[in-house]
Amino acid sequence: MTIRHRFTGRTALVTGAGSGIGRAVALAFAAEGANVVVAGRRREPLDETVDLIERAGGKALAVTADVSAAADIQAAVDAAVEHFGSLDVAVNNAGVFRGGASLTDLPEEDWHTQLDINLTGAFLALRAQVRRMRTQPSGGAIVNIASNIGVHRRAPGIAAYAATKAAVSVLTRGAALDHIADGVRINAVSPGPVDTSMSLRPGETEAGRAERMRTDAPLGRVSTVEEVAAAVLYLASDDAASTVGTDLVVDGGATA
């Protein structure tokens, strides 16, 4: 097996890195030589991610941050630069899901929570990250985590979540065009159902999800977090040097 080191000497910031896709992305960057800053609202799972990276011989730093607070995401960017000397890659993965209700039954609090974290959080993170990256001769690369549900999939009972993720995809394209001249490449990955608790519908078991996926996706299964991480690393790497403003769908063919 070929061992790749596409990110040796670079620093990557990953939000929502305490579990699921975010943790898998952080581990993948570290395995390819990056210094990794992991950010999230709860310290304990972040420390677990750091421990996994360090036990594998990598370097990592945990920063507690709420992406919906501008000061928190700026602090995470500053910590990356102060601790490792630069910010070369950022992955905006932090997100929440509040589903299972029609729009008329959705609590207003759930609407605002999803909007604040999924969309405003992506905006605040992009703003802070681009401001730093454009000062560096090497620029940088940013990958936002959107969702296939926000662009191509029917979305009964999850209209608010779908709206925020569709907005992240559009935000990605606009920001990419705004800042490619600054040397910052911005793209998105849109996963379909992934092997995490977030992909379970209300009251659904893992066995029920597996049965649903056998008919929902041509691949016949949910994607793994490692498969999503591989897509993220590709877009963040020099392999994708001419890829700008794209939204890479990883969903087993569900939206093909």
Image: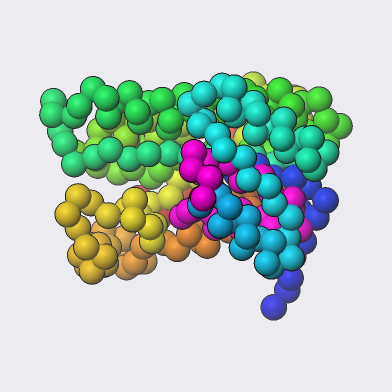
Q: Residue furthest front?
A: 44
Please check the rendered image and state whether residue 43 is part of the magenta-colored stretch, yes or no: yes
Q: Which is nearer the eye, 249 or 227? A: 227
Residue 230 x/y as whole percent? 58, 58
Q: How many marks?
A: 0
Colour style of the rendered protein structure: rainbow
Q: Residue furthest right?
A: 137
User: Horizontally, is 108 left or right of 73 in the view?
Assistant: left
Residue 76 seen from this side: yes
Compared to residue 55, the image places residue 190 above or below, namely above
Residue 126 x, y percent position in the rendering: 60, 28
Question: Which residue sits at x=46%, y=55%?
Answer: 20
**Residue 60, above or below 129:** below
Tell which of 219 and 167 is nearer to you: 167
x and y, in percent, of residue 31 in the image: 69, 63
Residue 222: image quadrant is: bottom left
Horizontal relation, residue 33 to residue 122: left or right: right
**Does residue 167 appear anywhere in the picture?**
no
Which residue does the image show at 51% across and 52% down from the upper left? 45
Quarter of the image for residue 224 reads bottom left
The stretch of residues the image draws in magenta is 16-44
Give the farthest residue toward the bottom.
Answer: 1
> Can you give x and y, in whole percent of width and height, for residue 139 in the image?
78, 33
Does the magenta-highlighted stretch encompass residue 19?
Answer: yes
* Residue located at (73% from left, 74% from top): 2
Query: On the rendered image, what quadrant is the N terminus found in?
Result: bottom right
- Point 32% across, 35% down: residue: 162
